[in-house]
Image: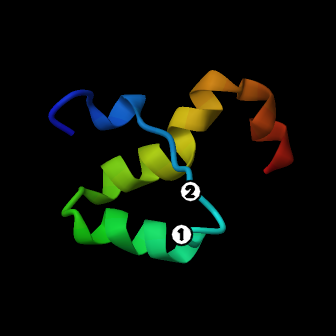
């Protein structure tokens, strides 16, 4: 978070080397706010790909 704000980060994994659950736990352990986690996990992607909002 020293290089870019949470609004510029998308959730992703390096599966199969790290599971999505382990990566998500790492984000939670990092101390990000609930709002930042929501942005990284969903909202930032929807801003880039608005058609995904229909997938629901």
Q: Residue at x 34, y 62 (%)?
A: 27
Q: Which residue is mark 1?
A: 18
Q: Which residue is mark 2?
A: 13
Q: Could you say where residue 54 lies in the image, as x and y percent from the top left?
A: 84, 39
The scheme the figure's colours follow is: rainbow
Determine whether the residue tagged by mark 1 lies in a helix, strand or loop.
Answer: loop
Instruction: Measure the C-alpha gap from mark 1 to mark 2.
Output: 6 Å
In this view, the residue in front, 46 or 5, is 5
Quarter of image, res 3: top left
In this view, the residue in front, 1 or 46, is 1
Q: Tags 1 and 2 in contact by the CB under 8 Å rule? A: yes
Q: Which mark sits nearer the N-terminus, 1 or 2?
A: 2
Q: Is residue 10 left or right of residue 25?
A: right
Q: Is residue 17 left or right of residue 55?
A: left
In this rendering, the answer to whether 11 lies above or below 46 is below
Q: Residue at x 65, y 68 (%)?
A: 16
Q: Could you say where residue 14 lies in the image, as x and y percent from the top left?
A: 57, 57
């Amino acid at each position: 978070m020293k290089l870019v704000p949470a609004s510029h980060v998308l959730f992703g994994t390096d599966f199969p080397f790290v599971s999505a659950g382990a990566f998500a736990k790492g984000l939670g352990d990092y101390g990000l706010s609930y709002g930042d986690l929501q942005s990284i996990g969903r909202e930032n992607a929807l801003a880039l790909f608005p058609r995904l909002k229909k997938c629901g």
